[in-house]
Image: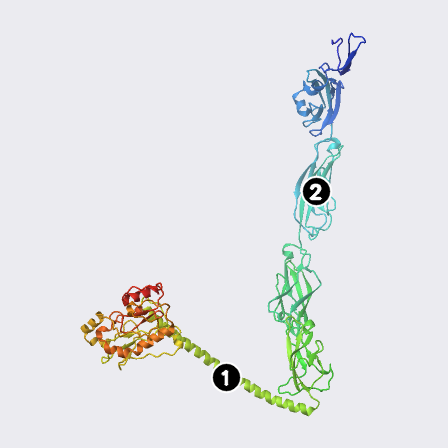
């Protein structure tokens, strides 16, 4: 396909062709195809302005950014070739400062301050250019219109502030000078002030004005004025300027204090504490500063011949009323005072107000019983016949209360009664009536205690005794109540004696308890000191161990001092047990210390002989053994030193039996033993202390022998224990404990 003629996109930007192809067959066949041809744009058209010369007018007071005119140039090309930009060409520097051209839309705006007096007409050239480099130009002519662009200038020559509120009308406040730089009508100025204020402005000389008062001023209403002075010229349009001044009005004491109310009512509770605040009065003064400073006074007055100042006082600064005394509602229920409020002006102004003070009742009075009258020794009783029906009116309790309101509302209740099922009391009227028919088993003398209670918070109450006699005749009643009076005196005396007796017995009981506790404490203290002196032996109460007995006589079988230690169980004190003395009539003494058993009197004997006896231990006497019937455990032929353990620990009965048997044979055994065969050189030596006491619950030691009857279960049954000395067994038992 070959282009035959030039194309113009602006006329036709798209062509549509149909191409047909034929073959040479018979019949001939063909095929078609559509060809769309798009004509691309070329920059073959330059921008063209709509006008060759643009003219516009602008006021000299135009603001920056104001649009003067808009130039327009069109380009029929498409795309970037049709996009046009605008710019000034060959423009003076000042013109460029006054006007601005938007390169995109061709708007010409004000860029600086235009002054008609400097230039009346501005000319400039504007060029339009597309992106293909083609251009067009036009001329712009802007004429400046003269306007009234100079506002009047206001100058305050003099100003007086504040001025007193009692200033007379026409008093000068300020002097004002007004000027306008324009000429002609534009330079003529008129001066005014804002409306609705008590001032006016007057022209005294050319371009000079004075501000004066027009009406009477009142600082209580308006204490400060904002005055606006406005100057307007006669230009078209007229220009104006304004100046604000603040004028203060000084106060004059022309207002007396005023109270919020013409009459006040205050309430105070009776029995109040003196000095308590009861009310507060407030007065206001429309003046200011010192003229508004208020002081409160009580007007001199009397109530019941007494000055009111003895009842009420007032704080002169705050106006708070205080009670000087405690009020009693039953004596004073209300009174009236007059309060004076005075300001601090010169001369001072004052006003008065009345305060009615009401005393409020408190429940400080208990009900008083008017009937039945209570007198000492009175035998007055109400009679109720035995034939009385249910609801029979026995009597009526009458009571009054000195209080008022709900504090005086009384209610009646049955507090005590001989028979609660026989009578009732009306809650509101105090009437005592029968609840049921009187029967023969009812006691003739019926005593009722009626409780009268008011409705105060807290409530007060009183009681009254009502004696009721259930009888049909008066003599019967009289005899019954006479006996009752005598019984009453007897019962009162009996009660007094019972109280005295009870107090005496209680005192003696307490003294006895203190003495017993003191003795117990002393014994306990002594036992602790006794056992603590023995080193490792635990502290055991002394009542568990019998005293130590020593034969100190020189004539007995036992020539030396020996100790007999008897250990009992905790329950042994419950059984009867006697300590059997040896056969000799030697002196038995008790060593309270328990640490040394030999008396000092024995030291005078032969020390050498005693030492040999103590240090030499001879074999045990074979005859000093339990017989078969005396053994607490099973019988056996072996010696006590070689005896095996008991199958079970001996019981307390068995231990006591063994100790009793040992004690009974002391006399016979000592006859066959000499001093060297006692076997006490180690165990019962003078140095022997409570640390060597055996375990009385498991072992039984025979006096005069080293043999030990052991009831321990520490070894298995059927095995023979290893022989050991008495000292080893004793130490083993102590370690085991």
User: Could you tell me residue 354's position as x and y percent?
Assistant: 69, 66
Going from N to C along the chain, the mark reached first, 2 or 1, is 2
Measuring from the top left, give residue 517's x and y in whole percent: 41, 75
Tell me residue 218's x, y (percent): 70, 52
Q: Indicate left or right for 659 with 169 as reference.
A: left
| Disc 2 + disc 1, Cβ < 8 Å | no
Pick the residue in front: 78 or 729. 729
Please state which of the two labelled residues, at mark 2 or mark 1, is closer to the viewer. Answer: 1
Can you identify the residue that label 2 sits on? 228
Pick whichever, 327 or 405, lies toward us. 405
Looking at the rendered structure, the number of numbered marks drawn on it comes to 2
* Local crowd size for mark 2, using a 10 Å CA cut-off: few (<14), some (14–19), many (≥20): some
Give the residue displayed 19% in from the left and 71% down from the top.
612
Cα gap from disc 2 to disc 1, whole angstroms: 107 Å
Please say whether residue 10 is visible from this viewpoint: no
Name the secondary structure under disc 1: helix
Q: Quadrant of residue 54?
A: top right
Question: On the rendered structure, is 297 left or right of 498?
Answer: right
Number of residues whose C-alpha sits closer than 10 Å to that of mark 1, classed few (under 14), some (14–19) or many (20 or more):
few
| Residue sitting at x 36%, y 67% | 647
* Residue that numbered label 1 is attached to: 501
- The reply to whether residue 696 is visible in this rendering is yes
Q: Is residue 238 above or below residue 433?
A: above
């Amino acid at each position: 396909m070959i282009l035959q003629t030039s194309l113009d996109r602006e006329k036709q930007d798209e062509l549509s062709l149909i191409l047909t192809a034929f073959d040479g067959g018979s019949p001939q066949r063909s095929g078609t195809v559509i060809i769309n041809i798009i004509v691309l744009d070329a920059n073959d058209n330059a921008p063209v302005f709509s006008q060759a010369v643009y003219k516009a007018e602008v006021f000299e007071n135009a603001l920056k950014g104001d649009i003067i005119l808009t130039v327009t140039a069109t380009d029929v090309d498409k795309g970037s070739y049709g996009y046009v930009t605008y710019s000034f060409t060959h423009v003076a520097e000042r013109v460029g400062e006054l006007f601005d051209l938007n390169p995109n839309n061709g708007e010409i705006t004000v860029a600086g301050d235009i002054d008609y007096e400097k230039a009346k007409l501005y000319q400039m050239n504007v060029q339009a250019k597309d992106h293909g480099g083609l251009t067009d130009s036009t001329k712009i002519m802007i004429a400046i219109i003269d306007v009234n662009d100079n506002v009047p200038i206001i100058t305050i020559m003099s100003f007086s502030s504040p001025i007193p509120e009692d200033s007379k009308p026409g008093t000068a406040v300020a002097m004002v000078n007004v000027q306008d730089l324009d000429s002609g009508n534009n330079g003529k100025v008129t001066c005014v002030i804002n409306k609705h204020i008590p001032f006016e402005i007057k022209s005294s000389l050319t371009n000079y004005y004075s501000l004066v008062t027009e009406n009477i001023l009142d600082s209580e209403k308006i204490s400060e004025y904002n005055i606006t002075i406005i100057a307007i010229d006669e230009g078209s349009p007229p220009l104006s300027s304004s100046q604000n001044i603040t004028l203060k009005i000084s106060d004059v004491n022309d207002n007396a204090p005023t109270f919020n109310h013409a009459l006040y009512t205050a309430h105070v509770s009776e029995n109040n504490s003196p000095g308590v605040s009861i009310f507060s009065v407030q007065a206001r003064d429309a003046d200011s500063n010192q003229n508004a400073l208020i002081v409160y006074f009580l007007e001199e007055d009397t109530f019941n011949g007494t000055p009111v100042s003895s009842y009420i006082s007032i704080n002169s600064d705050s106006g708070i009323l205080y009670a000087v005394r405690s009020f009693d509602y039953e004596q004073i229920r209300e009174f009236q005072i007059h309060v004076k409020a005075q300001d601090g002006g010169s001369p001072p102004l004052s006003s008065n107000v009345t305060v009615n003070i009401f005393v409020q009742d408190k429940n400080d009075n208990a009900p008083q019983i008017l009937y039945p009258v209570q007198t000492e020794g009175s035998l007055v009783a109400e009679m109720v016949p035995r034939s009385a029906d249910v609801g029979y009116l026995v009597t009526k309790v009458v009571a009054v209360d000195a209080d008022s309101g709900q504090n005086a509302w009384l209610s009646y209740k049955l507090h005590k009664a001989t028979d609660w099922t026989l009578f009732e009391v009306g809650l509101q009227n105090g009437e005592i009536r029968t609840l049921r028919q009187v029967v023969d088993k009812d006691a003739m003398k019926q005593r009722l205690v009626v409780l009268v209670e008011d409705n105060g918070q807290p409530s007060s109450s009183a009681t009254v005794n009502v004696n009721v006699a259930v009888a049909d005749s008066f003599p019967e009643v009289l005899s019954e109540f006479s006996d009752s009076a005598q019984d009453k005196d007897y019962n009162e005396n009996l009660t007094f004696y019972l109280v005295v007796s009870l107090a005496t017995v209680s005192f003696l009981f307490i003294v006895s308890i203190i003495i017993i506790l003191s003795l117990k404490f002393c014994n306990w203290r002594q036992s602790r000191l006794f056992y603590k002196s023995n080193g490792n032996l635990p502290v055991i109460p002394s009542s568990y161990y019998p005293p130590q007995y020593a034969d100190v006589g020189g004539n007995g079988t036992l020539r030396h001092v020996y100790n007999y230690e008897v250990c009992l169980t905790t329950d042994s004190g419950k059984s009867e047990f006697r300590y059997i003395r040896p056969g000799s009539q030697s002196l038995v003494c008790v060593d309270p210390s328990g640490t040394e058993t030999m008396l000092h009197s024995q030291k005078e004997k032969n020390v050498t002989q005693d030492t040999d006896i103590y240090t030499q231990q001879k074999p045990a006497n074979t005859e000093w053994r339990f017989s078969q019937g005396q053994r607490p455990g099973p019988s056996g032929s072996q010696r006590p030193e070689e005896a095996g353990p008991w199958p079970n620990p001996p019981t307390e009965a068995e231990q006591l039996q063994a100790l009793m048997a040992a004690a009974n044979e002391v006399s016979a055994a000592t006859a066959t033993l000499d001093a060297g065969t006692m076997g006490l050189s180690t165990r019962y030596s003078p140095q022997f202390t409570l640390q060597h006491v055996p375990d009385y619950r498991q072992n039984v030691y025979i006096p005069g022998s080293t043999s030990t009857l052991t009831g321990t279960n520490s070894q298995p049954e059927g095995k023979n224990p290893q022989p050991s000395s008495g000292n080893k067994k004793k130490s083993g038992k102590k370690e085991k404990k």
